[in-house]
Amino acid sequence: MEILSSRVSGLSESQTLAMSKRSRELKAQGIDVINLSLGEPDFTTPEPVKQAAKKAIDDNFSYYTAVSGYLELRQAISKKFKRDNNLDYSADQIVVSTGAKQSIANAVLSIINPGDEVIVPSPYWVSYLEIIRLAEGKTVLVKAGIETNFKVSAEQVRKAITPKTKMFLFSSPCNPTGSVYSRKELEALAAVFAEHPNITIISDEIYEHINFIGKTESIGTIPSMKDRVITVNGVSKAFAMTGWRVGYIGAPKAIAAACDKIQGQITSATCSIAQKATETAVTLDPSIVTPMRDMFKKRRDTVLRMMKEIPGMKANVPDGAFYVFPDVSYYFGKAHNETKITNATDLCFYLLDNARVAVVPGAAFGDDNHIRFSYAAAEEVLVKALNRMKESLALLK
C-alpha cells in the first residue's frame, strides 16, 4: 500500500541542499571539505539590524502579527520599493513571508491551475520547477546559452507562448548564471507580454543589490506591466540574513490577497522578531551593502582568473549574484582510476570525493553540461578550492 502522495513522490530534492548535506556529513567524519554548493553570504548581519531584533525581544514583540506582516513593516517595504526600484506598491499589496522561496510558492499556487503553462528561462533556480509541479502546472523551458550570457530573447519567449500560458517566471540578477537583464531587454519582453494580457510575470529580484554593473532594472516599472508583475525580494542575500527567513512580494491587490489567504493556512506570519529586523534592514541606506558587493566582485574576478588556468572550463562573466556557472563538458568521457565522467553530475561527485570541494550539478538548473559554485566564501578559501579543483581535474584523462 502506497502511503505517500503522488505529489511528494514526484517531487525532487533540492540539489543544492543535497550537496550541502553530503558536504556536512563528510565534515562530520573529520574530512576537510570546502562547501561551495550553497548561496549563502559569509558576511554577518549588519549591526543595526541585530540591534533592532534585540530591542524587539526586550520590548516583548513576540505575538502573532497580521499574516502578511505588521503594517509598519509593509509600509517600510513600500517605501523601499519606491526608493530603490521606482515601483509603486501600497502596504496592502505587500505580503511578507518566511523567505522568498515561500513568496514564490504563494504566488504560483495562487495563480496556476492544473495544466496551466509557466514559461521559465533556462538555466533557472532549482526550486522553480518543483514549485510549479506542486501547483500541477506545466513548465515550458526556454533555453539560453553562454553565447547570449544566458539571457533569453523576446522572440524565444514569443514562440514559447501558447493558449495555455499563464505565467512567466525569471530572476535578474540570475541564480545560477549571474546574468542581469538590461532595461532594453526587459522592454522587449514586455512588448511580447503586452500582446498576451492573461500572462502574469514573476520577477525574482532577491539578488538586486549584488549587481556589478549598476542598478537592477525591474520589469514592473514598464507602464504596460504595472498591473501584471509580482516582484519578489527579501533580505537573505543583500543583508546576509539567510537564517532570519524573510522574503516579500509586491503584487496586484487581488494576488496579494490570495497569497495572504494561502499563507494564512500554511504558516501564518513569519517570525515577529525577524520582521522587526527586516523593517530596519529595508530602511537602511542601500549603501550599507556596498562593501559586501565590492568584495563579491573581487572574489568573482579571482575565481574567473583562476578558472582560465583550468583546461576546458568555460564561463560567462557574471554581472550579479555570487555564482559562476562554467561549462565542463570538456571532461565528459574522461576517467581517473575507476571513475568515469559522463556528465556534470558525475563530475560533481568526483570533485567531492577527489578534491573535497562541493559544487552543484548543472542539471539542477537545467543544463548538465555545467556546474554551479558559489563564491560567497573568503578569498583564501576560494583560492584553495580552485587549486584543488585544478589538480583533481588534471588527473582525468
Image (cartoon, rainbow, N blue to C red):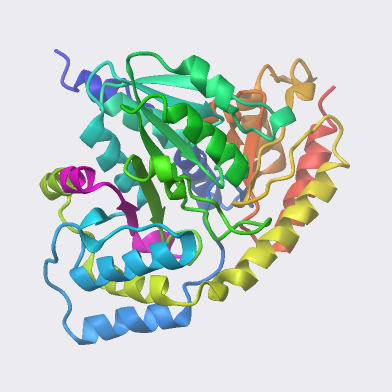
Say whether residue 244 is magenta. Answer: yes
Instruction: Indicate the position of residue 356 as horizontal and vertical percent values.
Output: 66, 44
Placement of the N terminus among the 4 image quadrants? top left
Say whether residue 76 is magenta. Answer: no
Q: Can you say whether 186 is above or below 305 in the image? A: above
Q: Choose top left, top right, bottom left or bottom right for residue 113.
A: top left
**Residue located at (62% from left, 26% from top):** 144
Q: Can you say whether 112 is above or below 105 in the image? A: above
**Which region of the structure is painted magenta?**
240-259
Question: Residue 181 or 275: which is nearer the viewer?
Answer: 181
Whether residue 13 is visible to the viewer of this picture, yes or no, is: no
Instruction: Indicate the position of residue 234 as horizontal and vertical percent values.
Output: 40, 58
Instruction: Indicate the position of residue 5 as horizontal and vertical percent values.
Output: 19, 21
Whether residue 123 is visible to the viewer of this picture, yes or no, is: yes
Instruction: Indicate the position of residue 283 as horizontal and vertical percent values.
Output: 40, 75
Q: Can you say whether 4 is above or below 389 in the image? A: above
Q: Can you say whether 344 is above or below 355 in the image? A: above
Left or right of 355 on screen, residue 100: left
**Residue located at (77% from left, 23% from top):** 331
Q: Choose top left, top right, bottom left or bottom right for residue 196.
A: top left
**Residue located at (57% from left, 21% from top):** 155
Question: Residue 298 or 221: which is nearer the viewer?
Answer: 221
**Number of marks present in the image shown:** 0
Question: Residue 396 or 371: which is nearer the viewer?
Answer: 371
Q: Choose top left, top right, bottom left or bottom right for residue 366.
A: top right
**Residue located at (62% from left, 45% from top):** 178
Placement of the C terminus among the 4 image quadrants? top right
